[in-house]
Image (spheres, rainbow, N blue to C red):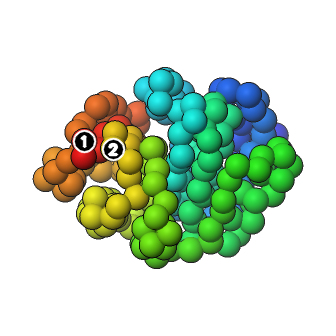
Amino acid sequence: MDRSQSKNRNKLRIIGGDLKRSRLDFPDLPGLRPTPDRIRETLFNWLQDDIIGADCLDLFAGSGALGFEAISRGAEQVYFIEKSSVATDAIKSNLERLKIGNATVLAEDARESLLRLQIQNQKFDLIFLDPPFSEKLIPSICKQLGESKIMNSGCKIYIESGDSIPDDLLPGPWALLKEKKAGTVNYYLFANTE
């Protein structure tokens, strides 16, 4: 690998909104793979009418790319949930450097966070769900999310997965709005119809 590739390896840029072109640094951790620009662009085109003023949850935040894109495009607030304290330290550093105050960062397991957020009566308009592909967490997290009371009516749920998602793995009140595949990444947008 040449030196220029090495320098940019753990950096990405916000691609839209008020913070467009701002740099995000992220650690080199196993399984951490920020959502590629092309997929983020498609996702936020899908969400353009829903993002301004939205309360967002970036579950399995990793680099925080999805949450930062949401903030840049007018989200009211973002909760970043990531179990790796190294990754959450990087998210906090990026928030501080970009002078972003409408975010909460929690270094804890996603399942524990969902329980805590429900107890705190937090409600969200948009949830990003992008767990490590190798851990096959989509079915159990979707089930827990569907049983929780943290989604506002009409909440949009974005899921990114290495596998296609069969309809029977999802909670009944979720309606598929969009789906696409880019390389080995399958990505979906659902709406909570309750």
Q: Secondary structure at mark 2?
A: strand
Residue at position x 40%, y 58% in the image: 150
**Residue 153: which disc?**
2
Res 138 seen here? yes
Q: Position of residue 137 (x, y in %)?
A: 35, 65
Q: Name the N-terminal-most of marks 2 and 1.
A: 2
| Image x and y of residue 65, in percent | 62, 45
Q: Nearer the viewer, residue 58 or 182?
A: 58
- The numbered dot on residue 111 is none
Q: Which mark is residue 193?
A: 1
- Residue at left offset 66%, top offset 59%: 104
Mark 1, secondary structure of its residue: loop
Image marks 2 and 1: residues in contact by CB distance under 8 Å: yes
The answer to whether one can see residue 1 in this image is no
Q: Residue at x 24, y 46 (%)?
A: 194
Q: Is residue 105 left or right of residue 181?
A: right
Q: In this picture, is 123 found above or below 109?
A: above
Q: How many marks?
A: 2
Query: Horizontal placement of 69 versus 101: left or right?
Result: left
Q: Is residue 110 above or below residue 35?
A: below
Disc 1 residue crowd, few under 14, some 14–19, many 20+, Cα 10 Å: some
Query: Could you tell me the amino acid type at mark 1?
Result: Thr
Bin the neighbour count of mark 2 within 10 Å (Cα to Cα): few under 14, some 14-19, many 20 and up: few
Task: In this rendered view, identify the residue nearer to me: 184 or 56.
Answer: 56
> Residue 131 location in percent, x, y?
44, 59
Front residue of this view, candidates 86 and 189: 189
Tell which of 21 and 103 is nearer to you.
Answer: 103
Q: Does 41 sit left or right of 151 as displayed?
A: right
Q: CA distance from mark 2 to mark 1?
A: 6 Å
Residue in the image at 70% along x and 41% along y: 12
